[in-house]
Image (cartoon, helix red, strand yellow):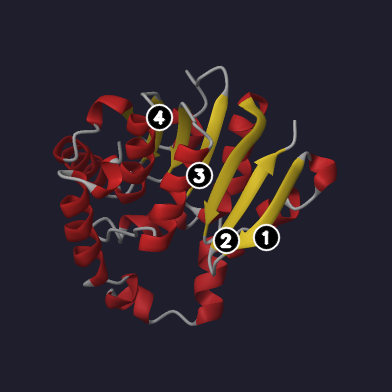
Amino acid sequence: MNTLTTTPLAPLLERLFAQADETSPMDLPAAAALTPEDLARLMRSKTHYVDFYGQMKDMPLAVSRETGVLLYMLARGAKVRTIVEFGTSFGISTLHLAAALRDNGGGRLITSEFEPSKVARARDNLTAGGLIDLVEIREGDALQTLAVDLPETIDLVLLDGAKALYPEILDLLESRLRPGALIVADNADYAPDYLARVRSPAAGYLSTPFAEDVELSMRLG
């Protein structure tokens, strides 16, 4: 069984990626005016990200096609049953992860998104993909929504929300990560504190950069 490459999910993802290709955060005047240094400072800020991401409520901010396939392969290959995602956006990454859960025989995916319009779009996409029954979308600040009612053990985590919050989100989840649990952090270069932590075996992780913009880490136990 391969949910990812069959109907209804495959054509849905193709359409969503095509739409994502037609948009860019740099299309927004406020973003286009930023220098690379300004953008890096903004992405690393723990106080200004709400306004920044709020301006991008109509942007998919999707993972790449390659990262989507990677997520499916990791979740499927490790036979994961419990997933936590930080940053739902339109649900493209969520669809890949939920497809792996379906093909693994089921499971639970908890994802958090603070922009209400994106929650609605993600729910519609997950429904269209036939995967909504596997996913719980929590609307609001992830520092609150991911602080309660988590699975006893977590098999895989995707970090793809505000980069400055990656260490804080990891704090919320760390005690529940099973030995061997995988963590995928998109655009982790904007989260140097997070990278320093997961790249330290003394902190209990094994980690490596993967492709151009992904950090893949494993909880050692």
Discs 4/1, front: 4
> How far apart are the two marked residues, 4 and 2, measured between alpha carbons?
36 Å
Structural crowding at the residue carrying mark 2, measured as other residues with C-alpha within 10 Å and reported as few (<14), some (14–19) or many (≥20): many
Question: Label 3 amino acid?
Answer: Leu
**Residue pointed to by mark 4:** 104
Residue at (16% x, 59% y) in the render: 15
Question: Label 1 amino acid?
Answer: Pro
Residue at (48% x, 52% y) in the render: 162
Query: Sequence-wise, which precedes: disc 4 or disc 1?
Result: 4
Question: Is mark 1 in CB contact (under 8 Å) with mark 2?
Answer: yes
**Residue pointed to by mark 2:** 44
> How far apart are the two marked residues, 1 and 2, measured between alpha carbons?
9 Å
Structural crowding at the residue carrying mark 1, measured as other residues with C-alpha within 10 Å and reported as few (<14), some (14–19) or many (≥20): some
Question: Label 4 amino acid?
Answer: Asn
The answer to which image quadrant residue 179 occupies is: top right
**Residue pointed to by mark 3:** 74
Residue 29 percent location from the top left of the image:
29, 77
